Image (cartoon, coloured by chain):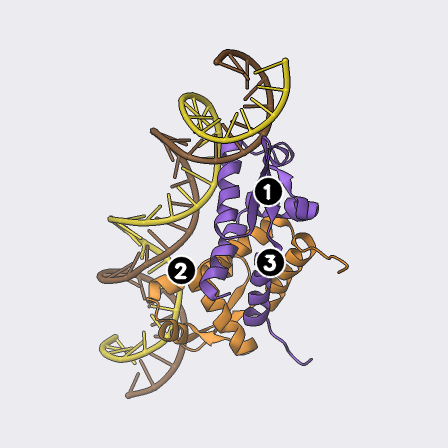
Chain colours: A purple, B orange, C yellow, D brown
Amino acid sequence: MDLDTCAKALKELGHPSRLGIYKRLVRSGHQGVPVGVLQKELDIPGSTLSHHISALMSVGLVKQKRDGRTLYCIPQFDTFNEVMGFLSDECCVDELT
Amino acid sequence: MDLDTCAKALKELGHPSRLGIYKRLVRSGHQGVPVGVLQKELDIPGSTLSHHISALMSVGLVKQKRDGRTLYCIPQFDTFNEVMGFLSDECCVDELT
DNA sequence: ACTACATTTCCATTAATATCGAATTATTTA
DNA sequence: TAAATAATTCGATATTAATGGAAATGTAGT
């Protein structure tokens, strides 16, 4: 992961609603959470929520999978871990105490 | 650190120039880097750079300390670590392999 | 006091983001 | 195929962010 890619991901996580969405998704693990459940739990209007979800998808932090009428949002741990890796490698100090 | 505070910090890191600035500061450790050095190394116009720096300061990721005519930018590791802590605690999975 | 230097603040412009009701698309069930 | 449900896209508006030249501020040396 390079700096620009990392910055884009951080930008999308840098909004309280989107960070809340991602946090909620992580709680549920690999099976994901339906958009409608997010909408009720986080109390965000449908269209607004939809934009936030697609912002998270645009940087690979979330994917969707349809099951009948419901769309599940699934967190992409790999992408998140790459972001964490970049921050850890490039922006952390490792002082030998 | 709460979600809103974390989101604000991530938002500021979520810009390639600012992430680059922070990364550069971390490289230099506690003594910091003069604004002018950042300006030359990162090739950003003075006023633009100044805005980016104050954005990072507004969320506590950077502080400044004057020494004569030069202003040093000093990364605030504590704030950064709190951000990392929040992400690690609230947005990471800990699967027992 | 004057000049040079380092950086910020002012100011204006342009671009991007956030928001959400209404209309639309996709899917299921009767 | 019509109605119900789930979610997106459209469209319009409001707000915030990014950018950088020019003017102002603070500091040091002469």
Amino acid carrying mark 3 in the image: Asp
- The location of residue B72, given as percent across then percent down, is 47, 74
Residue B64 visible, this angle:
no
Q: Is residue B79 above or below residue A67?
A: below
Disc 3 element: helix
Compare marks 1 and 3 and give the one earlier in the sequence: 1
Q: Read off the chain for label 2.
A: B
Q: Is the same chain shared between marks 1 and 3?
A: yes
A57 with respect to B50 (left or right): right
- The location of residue A38, given as percent across then percent down, is 62, 37
The mark closer to the camera, 2 or 3, is 3
- The location of residue B74, given as percent across then percent down, is 52, 71
In the rendered structure, are the residues bearing label 2 and label 1 in contact, judged by CB atoms less than 8 Å apart? Answer: no
The circle on residue A11 is none
In the rendered structure, are the residues bearing label 2 and label 3 in contact, judged by CB atoms less than 8 Å apart? Answer: no
Q: Is residue B16 above or below residue A64?
A: below
Disc 2 element: helix
Q: Read off the chain for label 3.
A: A
Q: Read off the chain for label 1.
A: A
> Badge 3: few (under 14), some or many (20 or more) residues near its Cα, within 10 Å?
few
Q: CA distance from mark 1 to mark 3?
A: 15 Å
Q: Residue at x 38, y 64 (%)?
A: B49
Outermost residue, right side: B96
The circle on residue B51 is 2
Amino acid carrying mark 2 in the image: His
The mark closer to the camera, 2 or 1, is 1
| Residue highlighted by disc 3 | A78
| Residue highlighted by disc 1 | A73
Q: Residue at x 50, y 61 (%)?
A: A6
- The location of residue B91, given as percent across then percent down, is 65, 53
Disc 1 element: strand
Using the image as rendered, state which of residue A56 and residue B70 is in the foreground.
Answer: A56
